[in-house]
Image: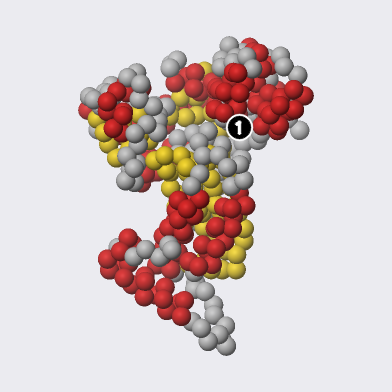
Amino acid sequence: MTSETQRTIVNIDVDRYTIACERLRDRRLQHKPLLLVGASGRMTVQSCSREASRFGVVKDMSLREALRHCPQATVRKGDNDYYNNISDVLTDIIAESAPVFEKASNSEFYLDVTGMDRYIGIQQWVTELQLKMQQHSGLPPSYGLSINKTISKVATHEAFSGGGRFVVEKGLEKAFLAPMPVIRIPGTEWELYRQLCFKGVRKIDTLQHLPHQLLLYAHGQEGLAIWKKARAIDPAPVVPYRRTRELVRSQQFSLDTTDMNILHTTIRRLVAALGYELRHGRWVTAAITVKIRYGNEDTYTKGTRLHPQNQDSILTATALRLFDALYNRRLLIRMVEVRLSRLSPGAVQTSLFEEDISPFSLYRSLDKVRERFGFDALDTRL
């Protein structure tokens, strides 16, 4: 088994991905303050360019306040379909070249290139892949290279403002992290960082020298996990990415929320859209997965198998049950996603002796209305 210090992990990401996508579409936006807002009625900043950040604009700020800080900013509404399409281009390029890779988000990828340095120069290979991604997508990816995912992710963020590439040599990982604030450790929540700062632990160097028992006692498993990452300990594997036949709907909130009414209503709407897609394509699903992403970008998923199904009522009940089992930290949620997989052609089989077929007739009637007037013509969430 390969030890952690023998691994070679690459993190590739595009700085401010959605901003970069909008500038690719409209070159006039280059080097200008740019704000992206969500498609919902609550107009808050989803992303902003570095030029806007210099005026004090931050993510999740109301659009009105952002424009007070930076009145010359251009405002655009986000376009998830466009961002997803460009992400597919990046994914295809990496899939053609990398033996094992994980897709962490639309723009972020982890590559396990352990052992490849016996045959080729890793840095040269990754740099060539970086250039190929830029040539085919038009976006400027950056990369970090080290012994694990945590160090490589931090290195990539250094690369955003340092030439597009950053390599942390083996044995220098702790020294690389030491001068940085603790909040730079991936997965660190602001509340934990605030508590550590109150105790005088602002820099990773200080955290590295604390006994792990103290972090475990004061902050539980979360504190222990951060302590390990501060000491460059991260055995998390690169989870191979596989495309499967599936349907996915997600909602990123304009403002992170813990409102259960909003969260449940959102899931009902996502499932209704997926159910319509299933029936319209004459598919049934045998698996459903719910994903949530907290405000600090920690992401968790939970799924289950189903009897082949395409009824909204059953899918909704299952999705809500998964969400309620998953959401146990009561932190602000940034995004929820519902994914249907193990799809196969067909329709739900009803019993020969089943008298009540009203749900099937109801769905057929609703789907006909939506086919004629659009999905939003009806709302069956409640």
Residue 146 position (above or below residue 366): above
For residue 121, which quarter of the picture? top right
Whether 292 is drawn above or below 35: the answer is below
Where residue 56 sits: x, y (%)?
35, 21
What number of labels is visible?
Answer: 1
Q: Is residue 311 above or below residue 268?
A: below
> 197 and 238: which one is in front?
197
How are the colours assigned in the image? secondary structure
- Image-based side of 215 in relation to 195, left or right: right
In front: 353, or 82?
353
Q: Relative to the observer, which residue lies in front, 358 or 14?
A: 358
Residue for point 59% across, 53% down: 324
Q: Is residue 280 visible?
A: yes
Observer-nearest of 144 and 308: 308
Q: What percent of the width, then of the height, locates residue 171?
A: 68, 14
Specify whether 278 is left or right of 81. right
Q: Secondary structure at mark 1?
A: strand
| Residue type marked 1 | Asp
Residue 222 picture quarter = top right
Which quadrant: the C terminus?
bottom left
Does any portion of residue 248 appear in the rendered image?
A: no
The percent coordinates of residue 185 (x first, y second) are 58, 24
**Residue ID at (42%, 73%):** 363
Mark 1 Cα shell of 10 Å, populated few (<14), some (14-19), many (≥20) = many
Residue 151 in the image: state x and y as whole percent: 60, 23
Q: Left or right: where does residue 75 sit relative to residue 232? A: left
Residue at which label 1 appears: 112
Pick the quarter of the image with the N terminus.
top right
Residue at 50%, 29% (x, y): give it: 12
